[in-house]
Amino acid sequence: MKKIGPLFLLIIILSGFTLNAQVRHEFLLQKGWKFTREDHPDSKLPEFDDHQWQQVSVPHDWAIYGPFSSRNDRQHVAITQDGQTAPTEHAGRTGGLPFVGVGWYRIKFNIPDHTPDKRVSLLFDGAMSNARVYINGQEVACWPNGYNSFHFDISPFIRPGKEITLAVRLENLPESSRWYPGAGLYRNVHVIVTQEAHIPVWGTRINTPVVKKEFARIHLQSQIIKPATQKPEAYQLVTTIHDPAGMTVATRTDKLTLYDDDTFKQDFIIPSPQCWDTENPALYTATSELFENGMLKDIYTTRFGIRSLAWGNQGFLLNEKPVKFKGVCNHHDLGPLGAAVNDAAIRRQIRLLKDMGCNAIRTSHNMPAPELVNACDEMGMMLVAESFDEWQAAKCQNGYHLYFNEWVEKDLVNLIRHYRNNPSIVMWCIGNEVIEQASESGAKLTLRLQNICHREDPSRPVTQGMDNPTAVINNNFAAVMDIPGFNYRPFMYPENYRKLPQPLLLGTETASTISSRGAYKFPVVRRSMHTYDDHQSSSYDVEHCGWSNLPEDDFIRHEDYPYCIGEFVWTGFDYLGEPTPYYTNWPSHSSLFGIIDLAGIPKDRYYLYRSHWNPDQETLHVLPHWTWPGKEGDTIPVFVYTNYPSAELFINGKSQGKVTKNSSVKAGNTENKEDRQAFTRQKRYRLMWMNTIYEPGTLRVVAYNSEGQAVAEKEVRTAGKPHHIELSADRTQLHADGQDLAFILVRIVDKDGNLCPDDDRQISFTVNGKGNFKAVANGNPASLESFQTPKMKLFHGQLTAIVQSREDEGEITFEATAPGVKRSTLILKTQKK
Ligand code: GAL
């Protein structure tokens, strides 16, 4: 094995680029698009005058700019999944943003040095929705599903030396979604130019059939497209495998024969492989050079991980070790950025989730963006990649059922071919709470979709989220799944498990606890579907929906029942739409389910999950805040979320007693009304002082380890008068690429730095230097303020402002001002990669 030296690497990269430029040229269409919401049929024609259209960059979500309105997608429906029997008016169900209707995008571009023998493909990572694509006025493709990637050959429509006009018409129907879908070319558009003989888009498939400590066996299949005039024997493939450090660890050369069906099959042995897992996301690459009669025709790189998956009696095994899913479900929107994909925003989400101890994301309820999948590969986050929220039977009047029969197989195939080489994806999910659960033919449909997954990728298991346990157990719907996934009702897990043939069970969707960051409600009692005049839910983490529960009601099952392989909490982040339980209460328009709010600020619940999921890191979190003017003498319970077994609470130095987690509480004997109301299960995981009386001053918590030693301390003080703005950025060094983002937490604090927890003054921002103001969010699910105006009211003393780098490097100065408090400035630096 030989390590590539930096100079040699540089030469290879440079010459690789030259070769690549000759044989394969790929670029993104990001800048220079024109956009309109007007639907003119001639928009597809090259000569159409679009000079009055808006100039935009892609990824672009046309609806996130608002304005919010209850009329944007008013739905008069009964949400039967939520137990509603009569239709009611749902104003904010899809986020209250103007995504419904038509949008056109146009761009003109050239392919340098194009010759008729070259092949040009367009790859859309996702276009929302009902895409119709035109090249030089001719329709060349359509794809209804707004979340899926699709590609097609546009070579026949290209004239060498002539500019190409690409026009895309998108149309979002009303009542087509249960959440905010976004709108427009919200993911990237790629142009891929190859020789006539080439490896097509998603043309390789890599498996690691044998993974041992000593060696791994890699099997690579590379499909080729070749001119009809050439015989298979004219082709040779040279593949080199590089390890995560860039060292060559294997190479081989193979010739194609008549019997290979235009697909090279190559096997490699990698000694002492570095396995991909969530702690060490080791990534290898296979670089394949395709030769035709000795002439280089293509260079194609496949990134992959070496890892094994197994599932059965021992649960779910990654590299032969059982793992429990400590997962979250997430919708695709990025809060104030809408659906427009952004790498920095995605990576920030993953960083926050990993710190919480989360090891998996379920991409509910649709195909993920490649940026998410790649970031999960690199950062060590498992993914369950989902496809559909609807099959043949409707949940929404204009939902996917309109397309299911014609498109389901094409959609599944594209999802799987796109991502079958990504090690982070450990499972496919073919559906979420589909209506067919209750039908006799549902099991056959399940099997059909699961078989498509197995045909396209025999290496991963298939699951789906089922919320009708009684029906799916009686009609075999659940029995045919590789991994039965249940949404909610964890009290039925034992019965489901007893009746099903599979030896394991997954909580595909759990909790749906609801809370608003910083909003504490009294009295502190467990409540279901409770609504308040301020449109918030309690941050004491004691409220949930009619079908759902509190985090510990799931923790206890996944700990006590060995056949449970873990859970996916609904949801990691708040998302636009589904403001349950405020169905009819405009201006509520975003969810309260998130462990982290829409601004990306952790709610209290974050620390409860962290204390349980990341026990090796210290968590010592105290709630609520301790600034309650006018409530002197009132009962204000105090909760502590910690990984330590006990803690003692002091109010102004006076002990309120020591509380210890009660490990004798078990799942089996606590499923009754009294124990639910008494928070019996919660007592195993959170420390609660229910009768503490408020007096201004200091809350101090001392945590004890299992030997009874005091090991950590935390104080929360009553805040004084608002004094200044405090700023902190998630990253202060950005890439000068015009895409990178810094997320700046903005807080109002007193002179000693204590958060003023109910301050809601408006903060204004200015950004100077080598960056731009991008967006702002405060996490209030009922706020109608624009995400793009550089000012916003605080929500419980905090908000997040987002700054974007430019392409020239240097400094960015971010300044925040507000009446009555001292302003603050933060300097960020940007550098070329
Ligand atoms: C589930 C559903 C999710 C979301 C959630 C809210 O039933 O699968 O999409 O609606 O409920 O609790």
Image (cartoon, grey):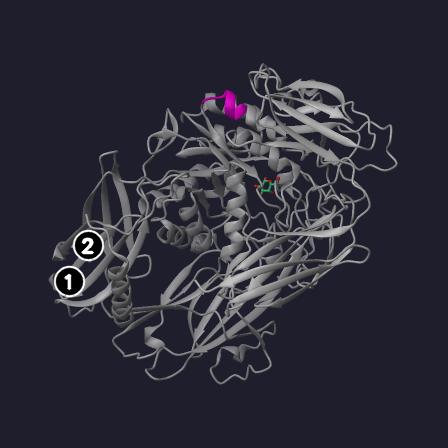
**Who's the residue at 14% across and 55% down the image?**
253
Q: Amino acid at mark 1?
A: Tyr
Residue 272 place in picture, x, y as percent: 24, 38
**Who's the residue at 23% across and 58% down the image?**
288
* Circle 2 residue: 264
Q: Which corner quadrant of the image does residue 658 belong to? A: top right
Q: Nearer the viewer, residue 827 or 31?
A: 827
On the rendering, which quadrant does ligand 1 occupy?
A: top right
Q: Nearer the viewer, residue 515 or 726?
A: 726
Give the structural element (helix, strand or loop) at label 1: strand
Task: Please provide the residue range marked out in magenta.
Answer: 557-562
Q: Answer with mark 1 or mark 2, whichever residue precedes in sequence.
A: 1
Give the structural element (helix, strand or loop) at label 2: strand
Q: Is residue 558 magenta?
A: yes
Q: Is residue 646 magenta?
A: no
Residue 325 position (above or below residue 194): above
Q: Nearer the viewer, residue 774 or 583?
A: 774
Tell me if I can see residue 339 in this picture: no
Residue 695 position (above or below residue 264): above
* Circle 1 residue: 235
Residue 628 place in picture, x, y as percent: 82, 36
Marks 1,2: beta carbons within 8 A:
yes
Secondary structure mostly taken by the magenta-highlighted segment of the chain: helix
Residue 176 place in picture, x, y as percent: 59, 55
Residue 92 position (above or below residue 294): above
